[in-house]
């Protein structure tokens, strides 16, 4: 089984190749649902956006979200990615 850092390195290396005409697209996610949607849509990777985490809680993107809230969101994203991967 390939580790997450090795998988990321392989993705980056693949998309550096001039023969690969498609760039690595990274849609953002901010909770478990958006993480599942990104995975189901077939994207190879994603990232968690602080703006999305703030916006879904009704805050502007001015760093009003606590570290605990960001950690909670990261756990929800990870859980959404894992559960979606198990479905496939």
Image: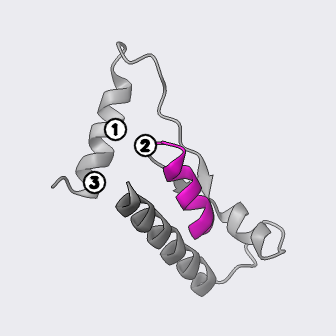
Q: How many marks?
A: 3
Q: Residue furthest bottom?
A: 68
Residue appearing at x 19%, y 52% in the figure: 2
In the image, residue 61 sits, relative to residue 18, either above or below, namely below
The chief SS type of the magenta part is helix
How far apart are the two marked residues, 2 and 3, measured between alpha carbons? Answer: 14 Å
Q: Which residues are magenta?
A: 30-44
Q: Residue furthest left?
A: 1
Is 48 in front, or is 63? 48
Q: Quadrant of the C terminus?
A: bottom left
Q: Name which of mark 2 and mark 3 comes first in the sequence.
A: 3
Q: Name which of mark 2 and mark 1 comes first in the sequence.
A: 1
**Which class describes the residues within 10 Å of circle 1: few (<14), some (14-19), or many (20+)?**
some
- The residue tagged 3 is 5
Residues at circles 1 and 3 in contact by the CB criterion of under 8 Å: no
Residues at circles 2 and 1 in contact by the CB criterion of under 8 Å: yes
Residue appearing at x 45%, y 72% in the figure: 79
Instruction: Let me know if residue 48 appears in the view.
Output: no
How far apart are the two marked residues, 2 and 1, measured between alpha carbons? Answer: 8 Å
- The residue tagged 1 is 11
- The residue tagged 2 is 44
How far apart are the two marked residues, 1 and 3, measured between alpha carbons? Answer: 10 Å
**Which class describes the residues within 10 Å of circle 2: few (<14), some (14-19), or many (20+)?**
some
């Amino acid at each position: 089984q390939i580790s997450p850092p090795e998988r990321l390195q392989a993705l980056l290396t693949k998309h550096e190749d001039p023969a690969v005409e498609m760039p690595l697209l990274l849609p953002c996610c901010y909770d478990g649902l958006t993480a599942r949607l990104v995975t189901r849509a077939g994207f190879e990777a994603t990232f968690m956006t602080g703006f999305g985490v703030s916006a879904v809680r009704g805050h502007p993107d001015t760093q009003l979200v606590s570290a605990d809230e960001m950690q909670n969101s990261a756990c929800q994203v990870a859980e959404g990615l894992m559960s979606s991967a198990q479905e496939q």
